[in-house]
Image (cartoon, rainbow, N blue to C red):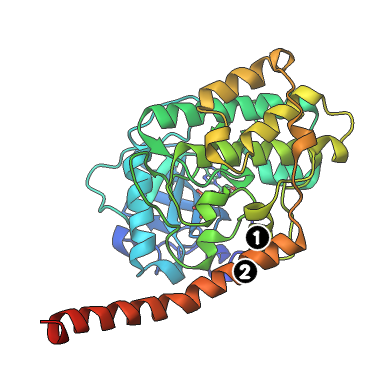
Amino acid sequence: MKLGLPNTLVAEAGTRNVPADQASYAGLRAGDVLDSRFRILEPLNHGGMATVFKAEDLQHVGQLVAIKVPLEKFASGLGAWSRVNREEEIGSQLAHPFLLRFLPVPGRPHGAYVVTEYLRGETLADRLQRQPPLSEAEALHIAGRVAEAVHYLHQHGAVHYDLKPGNVMLCDDGSLRLLDFGLAHPVATRRFRLQGTAPTMGTTEYIAPEQLAGKHGRISADIYALGAMLYEMVTGVAPFPAADALDGGMHRLTGDPVAPRSLNPALSPTVEEIILRALQRDPARRYRSADALQADLAAPWQVRVTGLCERLQPSTRTRRVFLKVRRFALLCLLPMVLQALLYVWIWWHFVHR
Ligand SMILES: Nc1ncnc2c1ncn2[C@@H]1O[C@H](COP(=O)(O)OP(=O)(O)O)[C@@H](O)[C@H]1O
Ligand SMILES: [Mg+2]
């Protein structure tokens, strides 16, 4: 699939050997050979930060791989470099049937590109665009597998932090892979902000409220994103669709989503309860682990319906305005408080003594 890719990427073949450290800014083309080893066949897709190419591994004739290279415009940025590095560092330590498999390439400079298995299929995002919503059974099946992969990730000390339909590949052979560890980081990180420039934050529909506020990057953010994906799978729309990211963020910080069954009355009350428990605004009220969520996804008939759908608070205009005013007032007050503290300090040191 070629989605709005720059023309240079799909230009006709010419055999060039591109060294690893020039992969991104050389504008890889079909026919190029990267690092004397990978023949670029075609661009597959690109996300916010990178282009992914289908390539042939010339050391293992006929073996297809996927090569992820930071977008040209980010090639010189530290953000892209650290994303690719982190992605490789985390990805190469993991081995799970529902996680993208990374291929080691000895001797390659770190951060230039990553090589992974090549997947034939479509992303969950493509699928949702083509045919929304999914049946309840299929949505539970997909969400259960993603939850299993996420639980494995958490057990290995990492948070994914960028769970969204574009990062889930539904493979033609019926399997599934969770992709893109570019924002993944250790569970223990106390404070974590999204890095890089705007495209990194392109899709905000699945981001937890505390993540939007730049707070702790904990596993609860992944639970929220899983809930948001399941919501979209069974209703056909994301929980906080908004004209722009800021508006959607404001809704999420101040209110709950519309009850899924009001959008899809055929949905069972137990699945609605699961979704709303994963989407609780307060992280402490969400599922404690992806494992607990997966258990409910596997046996939804055992879930006790507590009436979460009746306690939803819509994000009202008044509450949004109140929050904006409070933030503005705090921003105005801060310089005054700092100035007052400075006066007290000067008085204490120079006048009082
Ligand atoms: N191993 C792969 N095989 C086939 N397509 C892939 C593979 N990895 C990624 N893609 C495609 O490339 C897109 C972007 O990849 P991703 O790793 O999410 O990059 P970004 O960090 O820029 O979001 C995916 O949504 C998917 O369509
Ligand atoms: Mg991605």
The quarter of the picture where residue 231 lies is top right
In the picture of the structure, the residue carrying the numbered disc 2 is 324
Residue type, mark 1 in image:
Met
Q: Position of residue 333 (x, y in %)?
A: 46, 76
- Using a 10 Å C-alpha cutoff, classify the residue at mark 2 as few (fewer than 14 neighbours), some (14 to 19) or many (20 or more): few
- Nearest to N terminus: mark 2 or mark 1: 1
Residue at disc 2, CB closer than 8 Å to ligand 2 = no
Residue type, mark 2 in image:
Lys
Question: In the image, what residue occupies the spot 49% across and 62% down?
Answer: 29
How many callouts does the rendering have?
2
> Mark 2 against mark 1, which lies toward the viewer?
2
Q: Nearer the viewer, residue 259 or 138?
A: 259
Location of residue 13 with respect to 176 vertically, above or below:
below
Q: Secondary structure at mark 2?
A: helix
In the picture of the structure, the residue carrying the numbered disc 1 is 250
Question: In the image, what residue occupies the spot 21% across and 83% down?
Answer: 347
Does the rendering let one see residue 178? Answer: no
Q: Position of residue 221 (x, y in %)?
A: 52, 42
Q: Position of residue 249 (x, y in %)?
A: 63, 58
Does the rendering let one see residue 155? Answer: yes
